[in-house]
Image: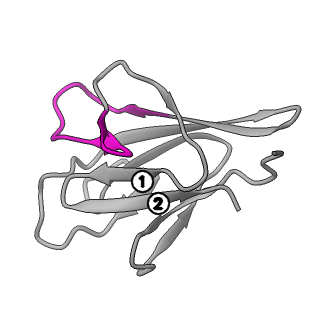
Amino acid sequence: EKISSPGKIKQQDGAYAFNLKEGRNIIGRAAETSKATIQIPAGNNRRMSREHLIIDVVKRPNGYSHAVSLYKENVNKTSINNEILKFGDSIILNDGDIINLPDISVVFETH
């Protein structure tokens, strides 16, 4: 299936959605000092790092590919579809994958 957009991540209850851009997307907790390109509101929860996860979006001849990895080594437990993501791992995302960040889960969508 041809993926024709860089995709998005959205909270499971639909409270918010963030469009991904081509290139490197840094996902983290919303904070004044965060360098994340996508800042997820986490309320008073501080278990998600300010720069927590990277989604690299690469345009290919047949559409986009999306690879997710951890931003740094020491972050709280993070998983993709309940599989633990370890530092150094790079996992290709598919439509509908659930990214379990500390305190928050988001869904990856390609359309």
Q: Quadrant of the C terminus?
A: bottom right
Residue at 11% x, 70% y is 44
Residue 102 image point, x, y percent: 20, 53
Q: Amino acid at mark 2?
A: Val
Image side of residue 51 versus residue 89, left or right: left
Give the crowd class for mark 2: few <14, some 14-19, many >=20 residues within 10 Å. many
Residue 83 image point, x, y percent: 32, 36
Query: What mark, if any, has residue 10 been given in the picture?
Result: none
Residue 75 image point, x, y percent: 18, 36
The magenta segment is 68-84
Is 74 colored magenta in this rendering?
yes
Residue 34 image point, x, y percent: 30, 52
Which residue, given by chain and number where applicable, does mark 1 sit on? Answer: 98
* Figure check: 26 above or below 18: above
Q: Secondary structure at mark 2?
A: strand
Query: What mark, if any, has residue 107 been given in the picture?
Result: 2
- Mark 2 touches mark 1? (CB < 8 Å): yes
For this rendering, which residue is in front, 91 or 26? Answer: 91
Residue at 27% x, 28% y is 72
**Which comes before the other along the chain, label 2 or label 1?**
1
